[in-house]
């Protein structure tokens, strides 16, 4: 089933095309990482999907409801903005109770729900403290709690770990991973490591346009570089360099780049190279510290796609 669907979604501010024909599909029950450099249109997309802004063109559906039916959409979604706002004089208990009232949750259920949420986000011990004294990480966790008060079918998170220290980021990402069991999560961010840790599917946006949309494992496989990296033991650089040079004429080799004790061998056929390269290593009696097939990171792919599109422009 599809939790989010857009068709040629557009948002223009005069001559600025903040979103230029976005068409994507987000599977129910997934954690979708919406990536892009600052100014790519990520926050604009979330504002359109949550009904906080009107599109200049195109259509969108969230949880089976066309965006524009604001009350129906609002009842089915949760939203954590990049900078969540709170009533600083309230306690977490009072704030979550207030949010639950807005959603029409009855008193007995509000009390139970508030207790459950504070336990889930690790704020039970500070439930009676004023929010004004909370750290940034505590405020983000409380923001996540308010975003799921109504058991949303779809949860929108805009830069949920922005500005957090490593410990705070880990706490928030662990919470997001747990939310997969409850909601479809649409997470906008420019922090690639966060997406690698928690997201099933990735969409990359640049200049208001969708560059690619695919499952993370599929994306990594699609952009795998057919290359091997080898590193020799210290003191053997000269012999290692000579051996690497001897690989260049082989029919299965595209190129060899040597950098001190490390070499990258780009090949034409990975299966053939896997057998031939190891055989050459054994034959030469070469002492290696490292031998591995090069695997691209999400950052490698992101920079390749975004920079490639920028050059086309």
Image (spheres, helix red, strand yellow):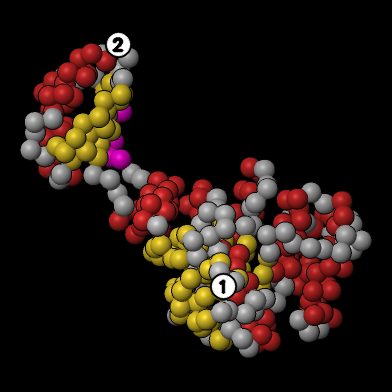
From the viewer's perspective, is the residue at label 1 or at label 2 nearer? 1
In front here: 292 or 38?
38
Q: Is residue 163 left or right of residue 18?
A: right
Q: Is residue 14 left or right of residue 304?
A: right
Instruction: Give the class, few, some or many, for how many residues have Cα within 10 Å of label 1's Cα (few <14, many ≥20).
Output: some
Whether residue 131 is situated above or below residue 48 in the rendered picture? above
What's the residue at 18%, 24% (across, down)? Answer: 244
Magenta part mainly helix, strand or loop? Answer: strand
* Residue 12, image quadrant: bottom right
Q: Which residue is mark 2?
A: 235
Labelled disc at residue 121? none
Q: Which element is circle 1 on?
A: strand
Q: Which residues are magenta?
A: 290-294
Q: Is residue 137 visible?
A: yes
Where residue 276 appears, as percent x and y from the top left, is 11, 35
Whether residue 254 is situated above or below residue 68 in the rendered picture? above
* Residue 48, image quadrant: bottom right
Where residue 160 appears, as percent x and y from the top left, is 64, 57
Q: Which residue is mark 1?
A: 12
Where residue 10 appears, as percent x and y from the top left, is 52, 75
The N terminus lies in which quarter of the figure?
A: bottom left
Q: Is residue 33 left or right of residue 279?
A: right
Specify which label sits upstream in the sequence, 1 or 2.
1
Q: Is residue 176 magenta?
A: no
Where residue 71 appears, as percent x and y from the top left, is 69, 86
What's the residue at 50%, 50% (across, down)? Answer: 192
Q: Is residue 2 visible?
A: no
| View extreme (top): residue | 235
């Amino acid at each position: 089933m599809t939790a989010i669907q857009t068709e040629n979604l557009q948002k223009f501010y005069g001559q600025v095309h903040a979103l230029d024909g976005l068409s994507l599909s987000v599977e129910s029950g997934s954690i979708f990482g919406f990536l892009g450099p600052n100014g790519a249109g990520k926050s604009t997309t979330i504002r359109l999907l949550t009904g906080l802004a009107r599109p200049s063109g195109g259509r969108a559906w969230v949880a089976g409801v066309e965006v524009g039916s604001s009350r129906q959409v609002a009842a089915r979604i949760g939203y954590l903005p990049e900078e969540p706002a709170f009533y600083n004089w309230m306690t977490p208990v009072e704030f979550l109770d207030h949010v639950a009232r807005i959603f029409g949750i009855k008193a007995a259920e509000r009390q139970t729900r508030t207790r459950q949420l504070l336990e889930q986000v690790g704020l039970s011990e500070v439930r009676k403290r004023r929010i004004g004294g909370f750290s940034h990480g505590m405020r983000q966790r409380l923001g996540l709690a308010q975003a799921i008060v109504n058991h949303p079918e779809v949860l929108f998170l805009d830069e949920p770990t922005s500005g957090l220290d490593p410990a705070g980021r880990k706490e928030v990402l662990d919470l997001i991973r747990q939310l997969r069991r409850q909601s479809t999560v649409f997470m906008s961010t420019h922090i690639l490591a966060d997406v690698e840790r928690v997201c099933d599917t990735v969409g990359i946006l640049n200049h208001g346009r969708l560059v690619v949309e695919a499952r993370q494992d599929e994306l990594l496989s699609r952009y795998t570089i057919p290359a091997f990296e080898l590193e020799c033991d210290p003191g053997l650089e000269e012999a290692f360099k000579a051996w690497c040079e001897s690989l260049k004429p082989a029919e299965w080799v595209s190129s060899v780049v040597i950098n001190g004790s490390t070499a990258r061998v780009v090949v034409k056929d990975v299966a053939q190279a896997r057998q031939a390269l190891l055989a050459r290593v054994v034959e030469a009696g070469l002492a290696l510290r490292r031998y591995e097939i090069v695997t691209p990171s999400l950052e490698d792919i992101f920079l390749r796609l975004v920079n490639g599109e920028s050059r086309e422009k």
